[in-house]
Amino acid sequence: MSSRVLFSKAGAATLRKNARLEGATRMKVLFTGGGTAGHINPALAAAGYLRGKDPDCEILYIGNKGGMEERLVAKAGYEIRTITISGFQRKLTPKNLVRNAQTVVRMFTASAEAKKLIQAFSPDVCVGTGGYVSGPVIREAAKLGIPCVIHESNAYPGVTTKMLAKSVKTVMLAVPDAKKYFDSSVNCTVTGNPVRGEVLSAEREASRKALGLDDRPLVLSFGGSLGASALNRAAAYLLAESAKEKKFQHIHGYGQHDEKFLSELSELGFRQKENPQVRLLEYIDNMPLCLSAADLVIGRAGAMTLSEIEAKSKASILIPSPNVAENHQYHNAMALVRRGAAEIIEEKDLTGEALWNKVNSILSDPQRLRTLGENAGKMEILDANERIYRVIRSAVKGS
């Protein structure tokens, strides 16, 4: 029987056992997750740490065709294969009903595509980090007897995580609070969120030099990988006001789906050529450098964003997205706010003036800026990458 073909759980287990007995020690790990950078970056962080510990390991990533994971995973240097899958639309409009019907069909075709890719790769373990693309991949891998583990980065678990929890060996949690949402039969362990090695190793002064910054404070703002129109509107006012005195430098990522931002900023009187201290980017490709160099961060409250803010001990103003399942970004943000590690502006209260006033207030109070950053640093689980690595290795050994 070829080691590339899996017919059953017993057959899969036998093939892996025989490979180890024959001295084949190279571990093969399949990662899956997508939709947003919040699902992709944890996988890339874990993959990077795994490659550092086991340089000979073979890594494959399965993502959604056309998803941003195609670009980010390839850029990180990992092989990627894709399936076609979509999520259900919660708002039941005629157009969305058609989309939901397509999703039902894709659930079956995606499972078949996933199974074929899994059989071809024959992994020792499959690691899911969320997003609907991970559903069919983890489900099919588990049916084939491949040890599976999943990671939940939010304080409130996503639908995919809860759906797959009983099919995997271990559910890795970013925060202990998430455990209460799972059945007692589910094997949960707290690992924290994995943080990319490039983020951890970036040094402030070297980063500021590489970015060509001067001694003025740097504000870093972004609305997530897909952008955020409400945050962009407020940031436009902030940029226009700050341009009048130029007291601080600013890097703003406005996202790939907000074409109006630049024109609206221009309408407020902002002129890029007159403000070299401001950099406007559709997507921030060098986030480790920018985050390390920043004095104050403004952004959404996605789990990975918060973990990186904590890892670099940065003061932040968090604007949770209200358009996420179970309002989980608000709960993520409040975990920091309650510990004096961040400030919050809920989107319903967000205006350009409110953001401008809060930025001014924090940057004019060095002690407050320092305290916010120090408290954020106290929240980081420093060995999250190692904890996740141990869970992956344990899953392989237990197969």
Image: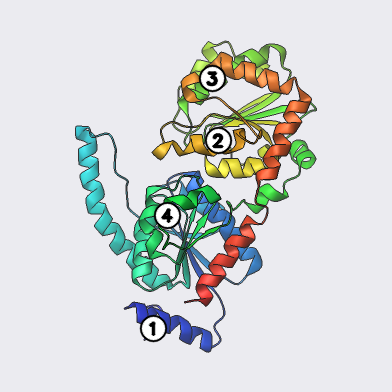
Callout 1 amino acid = Ser
Q: Position of residue 56 (x, y in %)?
A: 60, 72
Mark positioned earlier in the residue sequence (4 or 3):
4
Q: Residue at x 64, y 40 (%)?
A: 309
Dot 4: within a 10 Å radius of its alpha carbon, few (fewer than 14), some, or many (20 or more) residues?
some
Q: Does the rendering let one see residue 183?
A: yes
Label 4, label 3: how far apart the Cα atoms are: 38 Å
Q: Residue at x 60, y 59 (%)?
A: 48
- Eye-nearest disc, 4 or 3: 4
Q: Which residue is disc 4 drawn over?
A: 182
Mark positioned earlier in the residue sequence (4 or 2):
4
Callout 4 amino acid = Phe
Residue 269 location, quadrant: top right
Callout 2: helix, strand or loop? Answer: helix
Q: Which residue is disc 3 drawn over?
A: 234
Q: Are marks 1 and 4 in contact (CB under 8 Å)?
A: no
Label 1, label 3: how far apart the Cα atoms are: 59 Å
Question: Position of 306 compared to 208: left or right?
Answer: left
Q: Does the rendering let one see residue 3?
A: no
Q: Are marks 1 and 3 in contact (CB under 8 Å)?
A: no
Q: Position of residue 145 (x, y in %)?
A: 38, 74
Q: Which residue is disc 1 drawn over?
A: 2
